[in-house]
Amino acid sequence: MRRKNTVRRRGSAAVEAALVLPLLIGLFVASIEFSRANTVRNSVENAAYEGARRSILPGCTVAQVEDSVQDALNAVNVSGFAVVVTPDPIDETTEEVTVTVTARLDENAYTVPQFFSGREVASTCTLRRESALSLIE
């Protein structure tokens, strides 16, 4: 009689596992995707700042700013991004430079890109330029 009860319990444990396991796996995958989205968001913010820091140096070009942003995002495997540097071109009379970086979340998903279909993260950073005149004053 005791043996019969054990067999029933094994069956109910299998049914419980079959019901709960998909939910746990779904939560696990969702947590991975939201963590990746947060990483992409932080990386885009950092890349915009790094690009703006690069742009304030005397003699810097838009291509150098874009390379700086690309290096920062390639370090964390972010793809599908766009960089806008304002003004274009940067010259000696430019007082402020604004760098805007935008990345698509669905192109940077690890497992299921449908979580963030069509969503983007963007960051803008504006810094005053260093010029030969401001260094003298």
Image: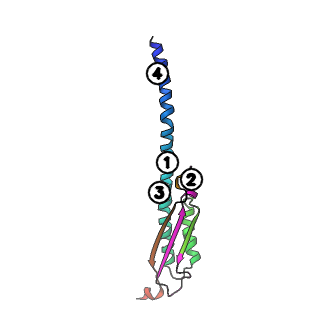
Residue sitting nearer the eye, 3 or 133: 3
The structure residue drawn at horizontal position 50% and vertical position 36%, both measured from the top left corner, is: 21
Asked if the residues shown at circle 4 and circle 2 are in contact, with their CB atoms under 8 angstroms apart, the answer is no
The structure residue drawn at horizontal position 48% and vertical position 79%, both measured from the top left corner, is: 97
Q: CA distance from mark 4 to mark 2?
A: 39 Å
- Mark drawn on residue 9: 4
Q: CA distance from mark 4 to mark 3?
A: 42 Å
Q: Where residue 46 appears, x then y in whole percent?
A: 48, 66
Q: Where residue 73 appears, x then y in whole percent?
A: 55, 63
Q: Where residue 40 appears, x then y in whole percent?
A: 51, 59
Which residue was labeled with disc 1?
A: 30
Mark 2 neighbour density, 10 Å: few (under 14) some (14–19) many (20 or more): some
Residue sitting nearer the eye, 110 or 55: 110
- For the residue labelled by badge 2, is the local secondary structure a helix, a strand or a loop? helix
Mark found first going from the N terminus, 3 or 2? 3
Q: CA distance from mark 1 to mark 4?
A: 31 Å
Q: CA distance from mark 1 to mark 2?
A: 11 Å
Mark 1 neighbour density, 10 Å: few (under 14) some (14–19) many (20 or more): some
Q: CA distance from mark 3 to mark 2?
A: 14 Å
Residue type at mark 3 is Asn
The mark lying in front, picked from 3 and 1, is 1
Residue type at mark 4 is Arg
- Mark drawn on residue 113: 2
Q: Relative to 28, is 133 above or below?
A: below
Which residue was labeled with disc 3?
A: 38
Mark found first going from the N terminus, 4 or 2? 4
Q: Answer whether residue 40 is magenta in the image.
A: no
Asked if the residues shown at circle 1 and circle 2 are in contact, with their CB atoms under 8 angstroms apart, the answer is no
Highlighted magenta segment, given as a residue range: 85-112
Residue type at mark 1 is Ala
